[in-house]
Image (cartoon, helix red, strand yellow):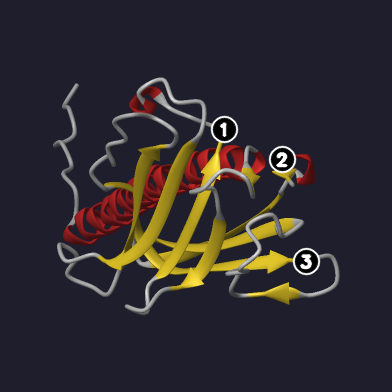
Amino acid sequence: MVSSPSRGFTLVEVLIAVTITSFLLMAVYGIFTSVSQAKGRLDTDGQGYHQARILFDRMGREIRGTYVNSAAEGTLFTGGTNSQGNLYLNLTTTANTPQSEGAAIVMVSYELLDDQESETPRKILIRRETPRFQTTSKTTEGAPIATGIEEMTLSFYDGQDWFTTWDDDDSTNLPQRVSIFLKIAMGDRSIPFRSAFEVPVIQARQ
């Protein structure tokens, strides 16, 4: 019995196989790239959301702990835009931290500054803390609490209207609510955040 000669692949068959393989590899690469980009975006978004949550948690706790007393010099609640054109918020609060030197009342100051280390126009929020009614009240060095900020605004509600500035001469005159708007850069996008906090009027003492 004579065996038939073995038959190889024709050029057309090889080209078809190469084409199909290329399409499969391109599809796999596309899926891998999409998954990788999605993971990177989730990681970036997660950092931004975490930063906003930490900021709102801290500022909310301090605003809810607002303490002013007309008989105690150095207690206050002011916010808006300072003489340098920077957004700020200053308040005395019972929400102290380990840096408070054991003080029951602390003065907390926030200021929004240009981020000198950023290659693009970004803002950085600086926080300072000073114990009140202590024999040695030392202001803590300003520390960044949020970076990558594109926009930030404060609004103060007096029960009837909203204001962008709260600087009343009467230290016991407090807003009922403070709204904070924040836009944080996340990669090539920016995500807005907004939250509002009530100011407890029971803390305002005559």
Q: Is residue 187 left or right of residue 155?
A: left
Residue 99 drawn at (x, y percent): 34, 27
Q: Earlier in the sequence, mark 3 or mark 2?
A: 3
Question: Which numbered disc, 3 or 2, marks the residue closer to the eye?
Answer: 2
User: Is residue 146 among what the camera can see?
Assistant: no
Q: Are marks 3 and 2 in contact (CB under 8 Å)?
A: no
Q: Residues within 10 Å of mark 1 (few under 14, many from 20)?
A: some
Q: Amino acid at mark 2?
A: Gln
User: Is the residue marked by circle 3 packed among few (<14), some (14-19), or many (20+) residues within 10 Å?
Assistant: some
In the image, is 134 to the left or to the right of 119? Answer: right
In the depicted view, which residue is nearer to us: 130 or 161?
A: 130
Residue type beneath disc 3: Asp
- Disc 3 target residue: 158
Q: Which one is earlier in the sequence, the residue at label 2 or at label 1?
A: 1
Choose top left, top right, bottom left or bottom right for residue 187.
bottom left
| Cβ atoms at labels 2 and 1 below 8 Å apart | yes
